[in-house]
Image (cartoon, rainbow, N blue to C red):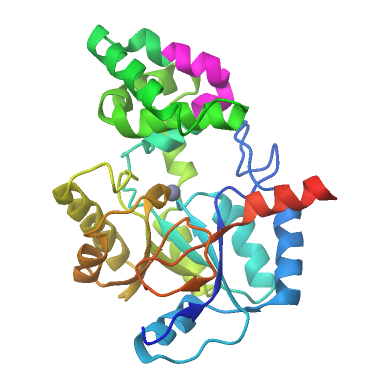
Amino acid sequence: MNQPLDLTVMMYHYVRDPGDAAEAGSGIPGMSVHAFEAQLDTLSRQHTFITWSDLQLALSENKPLSSSACLLTFDDGICDHYINVFKILRDRNLSGLFFVLDRFEDRGLILGHKIHFLLAKLGLPGLRGAVWEKLNSAQRDQFKQAEKRYQRQYPGTSIDSRINLLKAMLQRDLSIEVNPLLSDLFEMHVGSENETARSYYLNLEQIREMRAGGMHFGGHSHNHPWFDWIDSDTRRAEVKASAEWLQQFDSGPWAFAYPYGGLSDDSAHILERHAFVAAFTTKTQLTHSDPYSIGRLDGEEMAQESQGYA
Ligand SMILES: [Zn+2]
């Protein structure tokens, strides 16, 4: 990269309406289809949309991007992207970059998604209580210590902050211990985890159809861990798994999105070795000087803020 790149990158997760095929009665909220389309309208007035191929050429050959360039990205490879997003982008002749998890059949849900389903079913105190019940005394000590530590970051002054506190503990400190416990709770309160996962994540057929419709795909790891929480060997395994998954339908070079935006010093090196030429964070940033640390704006958050002011 010769000089910093000016680029607005939008990041999206769930795009769904209550009761539609993507939400499927789960109760998991997301950005509404209407809000998503309205945001595309606004963005199209302010920006020129580019594709992953445009960005890749800008990075590899220093080909300039259009002024006010904007790239649309979507994380987690969830069914919302096939059911709701793909059609909207295709109708507008736009392309998106979709970061998918490598999810082979019967691998179930990643920890973070189990939490989404269980939070929707049990609520925050319900989920916290159900997890606590299942922990042994050593794990309860670990839980209490982690809770104390994260309280500085998430003081619990809002429901979001309390949810983020529980998520941080479960997705970092206690991730190994609670992953199987959450699977048990999922079977008890929601249903078959594997069956849910099969319709929840994009399958290869849907990915191929989306690719034929002009969409691009990138990696997002296998287990969706915080990269600053796991060790270097695990990071390598996560990136390698992503590369192997993508190879099935795309020869690269690829982009990567760090799970939860978590960063580590060796990530760029590991990614580079596996044919990833760019990586996206969750840092709010519009000028980027490192291709392995491209910031993004959260579309859903922006829509909520503009609604609040309306
Ligand atoms: Zn993710």
Q: Residue 150 location, x and y as percent?
A: 41, 29
Q: Residue 15 location, x and y as percent?
A: 63, 50
Q: Is residue 147 visible?
A: yes
* 275 or 246, nearer to the observer: 275
Is 247 displayed left or right of 3 in the figure? left
Q: Which residues are magenta?
A: 117-130
Numbered-mark total:
0
Is 94 displayed left or right of 200 in the figure? right
The residue most toward the front is: 152
Judged by its main secondary structure, the magenta piece is helix
Quadrant for residue 111, please give it: top left
Q: Is residue 126 magenta?
A: yes
The residue most toward the right is: 310
Is 298 displayed left or right of 281 in the figure? right
Residue placed at 69% from the left, 73% from the top?
92
Q: Residue 8 location, x and y as percent?
A: 57, 71
* 306 or 151, nearer to the observer: 151
Q: Which image quarter holds the N terminus?
A: bottom left
Q: Is residue 125 magenta?
A: yes
* 288 or 44, nearer to the observer: 288
Q: Is residue 26 visible?
A: no
